[in-house]
Image (cartoon, helix red, strand yellow):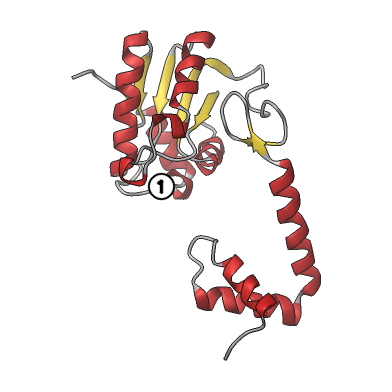
């Protein structure tokens, strides 16, 4: 059966979501059109509004509608300690653990030469400038314990140690191959508390 162009376009659009294949996208599309057209309109408006209004914090690159996000302008945070993470979801996970009171830098990805993603693509040049200009004393590397995450952490270590910054890596109570966004708060709290220094080779 061939769908109308508009319905096929909706199905294709929903497939951009992670974990959504053709059947799931078709089921969602039909549900919205059959049973919840008001919900579909609300979803469409919220998506358009988010895309138009949400950008990146000038300082940490996290999502925000402001020039500087709420965490970066919070005077009660420890501005001398910065935790480097891969995604905004990782920031939410660490904040939920309640064990970290410093600031963040969000890479929005990780180094992946095979995909053409280099240091500038994940903002490492901006981060190096921030470390120097803000006098950051400690950087906690909280990239995911994946091959790409470890390579990114290694690159950051090599970049930061000549600057005289204390560099530590979160302890891996976080499972190898896992992603911070899906780790429970107590495991993350343990990983942050048990972070270890990164020694140069």
Residue 127 versus residue 144: which sits nearer the camera?
Answer: 127
Residue with the most extreme left position: 201
The quarter of the picture where residue 152 lies is top left
* Residue drawn at the location 51% of the way across and 16% of the way down: 130
Q: Nearer the viewer, residue 140 or 129?
A: 129
User: Would residue 60 be found to the left or right of residue 116 on screen?
Assistant: right
Marks counted in the figure total 1
Q: Residue at x 69, y 48 (%)?
A: 51
Residue farthest to the bottom, as pictured: 1
Rendered-image quadrant of the C terminus: top left
Say whether residue 162 is left or right of residue 53.
left
Image coordinates of residue 57 in percent, x first then y, are 63, 29
Asked whether residue 171 appears in the rendered view, the answer is no
Q: Is residue 129 above or below residue 170?
A: above
Q: Image quarter for residue 161?
A: top left
Q: Quadrant of residue 119?
A: top left
């Amino acid at each position: 059966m061939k769908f109308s162009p508009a319905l096929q376009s909706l199905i294709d659009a929903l497939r951009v979501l992670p974990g959504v294949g053709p059947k799931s996208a078709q089921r969602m599309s039909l549900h919205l059109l059959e049973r919840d057209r008001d919900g579909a309109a609300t979803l469409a408006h919220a998506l358009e509004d988010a895309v138009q209004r949400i950008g990146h914090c000038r300082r940490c690159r996290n999502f925000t509608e402001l020039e500087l996000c709420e965490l970066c302008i919070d005077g009660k945070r420890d501005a001398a300690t910065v935790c480097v993470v891969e995604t905004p979801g990782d920031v939410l996970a660490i904040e939920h653990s309640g064990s970290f009171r410093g600031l963040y830098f969000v890479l929005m990805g990780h180094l992946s030469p095979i995909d053409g993603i280099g240091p500038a693509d994940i903002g490492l040049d901006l981060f190096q400038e921030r470390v120097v200009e803000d006098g950051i004393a400690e950087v906690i590397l909280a990239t995911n314990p994946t091959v790409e995450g470890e390579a990114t952490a290694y690159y950051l270590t090599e970049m930061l140690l000549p600057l005289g910054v204390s560099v530590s890596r979160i302890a891996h109570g976080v499972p190898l191959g896992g992603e911070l966004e899906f780790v429970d708060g107590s495991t993350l709290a343990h990983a942050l508390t048990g972070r270890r220094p990164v020694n140069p080779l």
